Image (cartoon, rainbow, N blue to C red):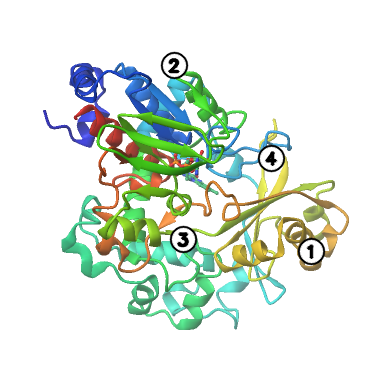
Amino acid sequence: MKLTRRDFGMGAAALGLTLMAERASARMGKPKDVDVIVLGAGVSGLNAAWLLEEQGLKVLLLEGRQRVGGRVFTLQDQPGYPEMGFNSMGEGYGRGIDAAMRAGVELENLVPRFRGGPQQELYLDGRRITREQWSTSPLNPFPDQLKGSMPWEVTGKMVSQHNRLPDGGLWNDPSNAKLDISLYSFLKTQGLSDAAINLVSLSPYYGTSAYDVSALMLEFNDGFVKGQIAAGPRMLAVKGGNINLPNGMAKLLKGDILFGKDVVAIDNLTDKAEVRCADGSVYSAPRVICSLPLPTLRNIAIRPGLSGPQARAVAELKYQPLSIAFLTVTEPFWEDDEASPAMWTDDRLGVVMPQRFGADPNEITGLTVQARGHLAQYWDRLGKEDALALVVQRLEALRPAAKGKVKGAYLHSWTAERFNMGAFSYFGPGQIAAFSATMSEPVGRLHFCGEHTAVGARGLEGALESSERVAIEILSL
Ligand SMILES: Cc1cc2nc3c(=O)[nH]c(=O)nc-3n(C[C@H](O)[C@H](O)[C@H](O)COP(=O)(O)OP(=O)(O)OC[C@H]3O[C@@H](n4cnc5c(N)ncnc54)[C@H](O)[C@@H]3O)c2cc1C
């Protein structure tokens, strides 16, 4: 029986997976211990474990941190429960919505919280430029048709309007390899000057500059975003903090989740796979699923070693530098200087985003400040304490009314997190063609999942998609 991703979305029960599980279990030899070890208790690892347990397999989860969720991470001790990782899902997140239902958490629509309040404003060279002023500003480097667009809108707009992919589902098909060029080349073809490209790349969603990100990946991403918009207008997040989702998913599991298990080696043997942790413990099972982000996998000895495009992917796939500061506010300084609290700057401050997560959606519960790309790398070089002090100092410099009214409460660097070493994966130009199609294939007894291995969806939905694919892979043995 051959299963496609679409079949799986129809529901496991309808597909007779139980039968497949019995066959798989028999072929693996009955476990002395467990059938499958899952490395990493982010949403992809948790969901893979749940899917396999549902089909009767015994699963053990090994997690390096002292918590589940990985890149789903809520600051539960700060006002408004700010999110340092996963923010929200679109209405087309069928898997995400299903996981939330299973986990028994309530989803709420964030749109009313973000619709209110003043729009994001631009700060260049220390000066505030409103949307009205921008189209005629001497600092505006955009061609005439884009003069009215703010810098943070341009890349998305250009990719959306000039998307070259006739079928987003075929984004990594070899026939599209010629499209795997840099965002820089793509934007150049659309008539943007170097000054314009540099400006739109100051706070890039993906990459550190327009040179190191694949336009083809952005076009695939654009198709996914359009699908979400078509599915409905709501943006859904978990009430009380997104971390409740992985916490709820973990409670559904029958097998153990062992915390503080920093995996350092995986031995792919003929009759089993062995996993070694930094504390000296060793676990073995007929199959191992690795959901670890590739920058962390780079530091793990896989024996025998990976080869070909797969080895290249582990060594080279890029991960987004991204840091987030959370500031508490004692007085609404934006009422004093009558400018928006939402700021997109070319300053070392980064991008300031007011949070509205109180009982009243108009109340600002704090500010998150994001550094992406090179700015995130600069913050990392400073270290957390100095970077947080810098954020407050630069905010006060650009907004004197904020003086003494903001406090740096927390700084989270996804690059500095040793169990991630980057926020999310992205392909550089040429990398899709070089290794995307084969990078997640099983190697001996070792299987792979995680957001970086998704081929249909993106973000959290992609992580869940990958867990379905890997569960099918094992159940089909
Ligand atoms: C800032 C940010 C914002 C985001 N916003 C959104 C959004 O709005 N919408 C969306 O859909 N997606 C969003 N995402 C992406 C989404 O959060 C991820 O795609 C998803 O959570 C990834 O899950 P995963 O299981 O693949 O990886 P992870 O969550 O990273 O799980 C991997 C696990 O492996 C563990 N691990 C790593 N190394 C080791 C080791 N050596 N030994 C043992 N364990 C180890 C980690 O601790 C972790 O728990 C965002 C991500 C970030 C960082």
Q: Nearer the viewer, mark 4 or mark 2?
A: 2
Tag 2: amino acid: Lys
Q: Nearer the viewer, residue 44 or 219?
A: 44
Disc 1 from disc 3: Cα separation: 28 Å
Q: Which mark is residue 254?
A: 2
Q: Is residue 449 visible?
A: no
- Of the numbered discs 4 and 2, the one sitting upstream in the chain is 2
Q: How many marks?
A: 4
Of 188 and 376, nearer the camera is: 376
Q: Which residue is mark 3?
A: 206
Circle nearer the N terminus (1, 3):
3
Left or right, 286 with respect to 341, comes to: left
Of labels 4 and 1, earlier in sequence is: 4
Asked whether mark 3 lies closer than 8 Å to ligand 1, one says no
Is ligand 1 less than 8 Å from the beta carbon at label 2? no
Which residue corresponds to mark 4?
A: 362
Q: Could you tell me the amino acid type at mark 3?
A: Tyr
Q: Residues within 10 Å of mark 2 (few under 14, many from 20)?
A: some
Q: CA distance from mark 3 to mark 4?
A: 30 Å
Q: Secondary structure at mark 2?
A: loop
Snapshot quadrant of residue 90: top left
Asked if the residue under mark 2 is in contact with the one under mark 3, i.e. CB atoms within 8 Å, the reply is no
The numbered mark, 1 or 2, whose residue comes first in the sequence reads 2
Question: Which mark is first along the chain, 4 or 3?
Answer: 3
